[in-house]
Image (cartoon, grey):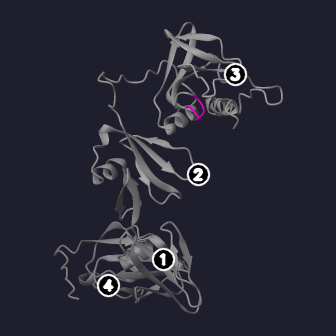
């Protein structure tokens, strides 16, 4: 490899870059073209009794130790590493040997020394052990008396299913905009739902990012924002706030919901709520009356429009009362918590009450 030589300026003042063991370099100005190892260490803040160990990081990637009275050849590189050490340990990165003045080395430093790109994994090789991939924020204790070997792996690739189309990414973090655009969808035209195994579905905003390393990520499901009967779909009302956890959960359902104040009451309305098989309709609007002092005061009962009827024709008990909600007739389901597990404001919320709703609906069809 040809090394480019850099001639220092005639005024004998020159700048160099110096770092500690983290390889985070800072620029220093020197008053000489031929600094010694001792001079480099002193500029970086070391005293002779600290036993500073100085390495010159050459432009060709090699590390050379620089003794206290030895003059550095700035023509082969102006970067230096200074550490308090009385010796070095031997490591290799992709077969290239380095003397490292510490018993521990950061994986981020291995990347810098070996010029390993971010989309390649870093592996530790040890005899008698399977090669071990290292996290970027990890460190490795170097074994004494031997050579610690590191290597780069093949570029990592992550897959994501976007509405049935698989896309790949060489970075573990992908923006929602990038994911949808690469799959051929306009991000602004869709309600975007992320499905993760074992977790509730979660609605994503256009400005979010997705961590593809998270376990269980399965796919992104899209729902058109403007499917309607020819009339413009109005934005959901938010006339009062719910708990943060309630809103996150409702967003994750992928259903439209709103909060309104009508008839002296506060209502949470969930549109197109799925109704279990066994009823004569598949979806309905579900209403919960949310007290002004919620969550200290409990949410009681629930309300459905249109009214639910069983396919068997059997009458559903305690559903005969009607409730007007903003001019719409809702069927009141008189379902209450028992004395065994009463409402607990530190534990119960919209999420737990929706579980009560689901169990009540299933109970009437024998499930």
Q: Is residue 11 above or below residue 90?
A: above
Give the Cα separation between the discs numbered 3 and 2: 28 Å
Mark 3 Cα within 10 Å, few/some/many (few <14, many 20+)?
A: many
State if disc 2 and disc 1 touch (CB < 8 Å). no
Which of the labelled discs sits on residue 198, or is there none? 2
Q: Is residue 188 above or below residue 298?
A: below
Instruction: Judge left or right: residue 175 versus residue 199.
Output: left
Label 1 sits on a secondary structure element that is strand
Figure check: 238 above or below 61: above
Q: Which residue is mark 4?
A: 72
Residue holding disc 3 = 298
Magenta residues, start to end: 275-279
Q: Position of residue 139 (x, y in %)?
A: 54, 72
Residue at the farthest bottom position: 145
Q: Residues within 10 Å of mark 2 (few under 14, many from 20)?
A: few
**Where residue 209 appears, x then y in whole percent?**
40, 49
Q: Earlier in the sequence, mark 1 or mark 2?
A: 1
Q: What residue is pinned by disc 1? A: 83
């Amino acid at each position: 490899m040809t090394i480019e030589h850099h001639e220092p300026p005639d005024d004998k003042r020159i700048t160099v870059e110096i770092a500690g063991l983290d390889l985070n370099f800072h620029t220093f100005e020197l008053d000489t073209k031929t600094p010694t190892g001792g001079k480099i260490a002193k500029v970086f803040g070391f005293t002779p009794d600290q036993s500073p160990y100085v390495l010159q990081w050459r432009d060709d990637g090699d590390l050379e130790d620089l003794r206290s009275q030895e003059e550095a050849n700035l023509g082969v590189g102006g970067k230096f590493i200074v550490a308090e050490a009385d010796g070095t340990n031997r490591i290799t990165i992709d077969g290239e040997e380095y003397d490292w003045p510490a018993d521990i080395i950061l994986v981020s430093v291995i990347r810098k020394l070996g010029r390993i790109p971010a989309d390649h994994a870093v592996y530790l090789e040890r005899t008698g052990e399977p090669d071990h991939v290292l996290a970027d924020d990890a460190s490795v204790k170097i074994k004494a008396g031997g050579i610690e070997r590191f290597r780069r792996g093949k570029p990592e690739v992550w897959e994501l299913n976007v509405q049935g189309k698989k896309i790949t990414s060489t970075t573990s973090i992908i923006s929602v905009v990038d994911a949808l655009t690469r799959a051929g969808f306009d991000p602004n035209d869709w309600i975007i739902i992320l499905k993760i195994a074992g977790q509730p579905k979660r609605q994503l905003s256009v400005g979010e990012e997705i961590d593809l390393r998270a376990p269980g990520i399965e796919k992104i499901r899209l729902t058109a924002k403007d499917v309607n009967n020819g009339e413009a779909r109005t934005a959901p009302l938010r006339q009062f706030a719910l708990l943060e956890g309630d809103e996150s959960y409702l967003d994750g359902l992928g259903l439209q919901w709103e909060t309104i104040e009508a008839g002296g009451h506060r209502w949470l309305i969930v549109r197109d709520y799925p109704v279990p098989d066994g009823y004569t309709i598949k979806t309905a609007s579900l209403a919960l009356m949310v007290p002004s002092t919620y969550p200290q005061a409990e949410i009681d009962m629930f309300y459905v429009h249109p009214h639910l009827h069983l396919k068997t024709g059997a009458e559903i008990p305690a559903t005969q009362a009607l409730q007007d909600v903003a001019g719409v007739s809702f069927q009141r389901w008189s379902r209450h918590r028992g004395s065994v597990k009463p409402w607990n404001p530190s534990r119960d919320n919209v999420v737990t009450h929706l579980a009560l709703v689901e169990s009540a609906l299933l109970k009437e069809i024998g499930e």
